[in-house]
Amino acid sequence: MIRCLFALSMMITVMSLSMADDTGDRRVRVALALSSHGCGKCRTDVQTCRAEALQSGQPLVLFIGDCHGKAKELPHSTAIFCRVPEYKIEGEPVSGIVVLGLQKGDFKALAIWKQLPSSATAAEIGDALSVAERGAPAKLDWGY
């Protein structure tokens, strides 16, 4: 009888500990999921963002990976901000920030106006956006 009570108390202890670990794991998973939503200004559906940029003529800023809150630092910008897990230029994966704007010409298409590293400041992103909004070509730096 004592063995049964001891076994029962051990089972209850183990179950309560495993449930506590599960609750802690669940909290960690929720915190990680919430932290990956970025700043709240970026969207994640790149096709919808591209279509809207083509229709409205607004620049499109693609943050490859996470924006780290940089989109929120540009409150007066009319650009469309989008987070994408990966992006390829001519079939090669790139990292950082890509600023797209309307391409000059008779047809509507988006062209890459500037590519910035992930460490770019809000001022650098703002400068790239002003270039894309004006429609003046910018020199691309592919060497970083």
Image (cartoon, helix red, strand yellow):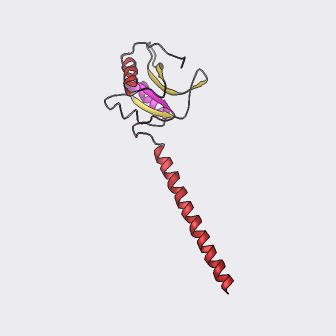
- Residue 79 in the image: state x and y as whole percent: 38, 28
Q: Is 57 covered by the magenta stretch?
A: yes
Q: Furthest-left residue in view?
A: 76
> Quick check: 138 left or right of 90?
left
State the quadrant of the N terminus. bottom right
Residue 89 seen from this side: yes
Residue lying at the far bottom in this picture: please name it.
1
Queried whether the magenta region covers residue 88, the answer comes back as: no
Q: How many marks?
A: 0
Q: Position of residue 93 (x, y in %)?
A: 59, 26
Q: Position of residue 105 (x, y in %)?
A: 44, 12
Q: Residue at x 67, y 82 (%)?
A: 4
Q: Is residue 23 left or right of residue 104?
A: right
Q: What is the quadrant of residue 11 in the picture?
A: bottom right
Quadrant of res 52: top left
Between 108 and 111, the residue placed more toward the observer is 111
Q: Which region of the structure is painted magenta?
A: 40-69
Residue 50 seen by the camera: no
Seen in the picture, residue 123 relative to 22 is either above or below; the reply is: above
Q: Is residue 138 above or below residue 45?
A: above
* Residue drawn at the location 61% of the way across and 23% of the way down: 91
Q: Residue 44 placed where, x, y %?
A: 48, 37
Q: Nearer the viewer, residue 108 or 58?
A: 58
Q: Is residue 5 left or right of residue 86?
A: right
Tell me if residue 35 comes above or below residue 65 in the rendering. Answer: below
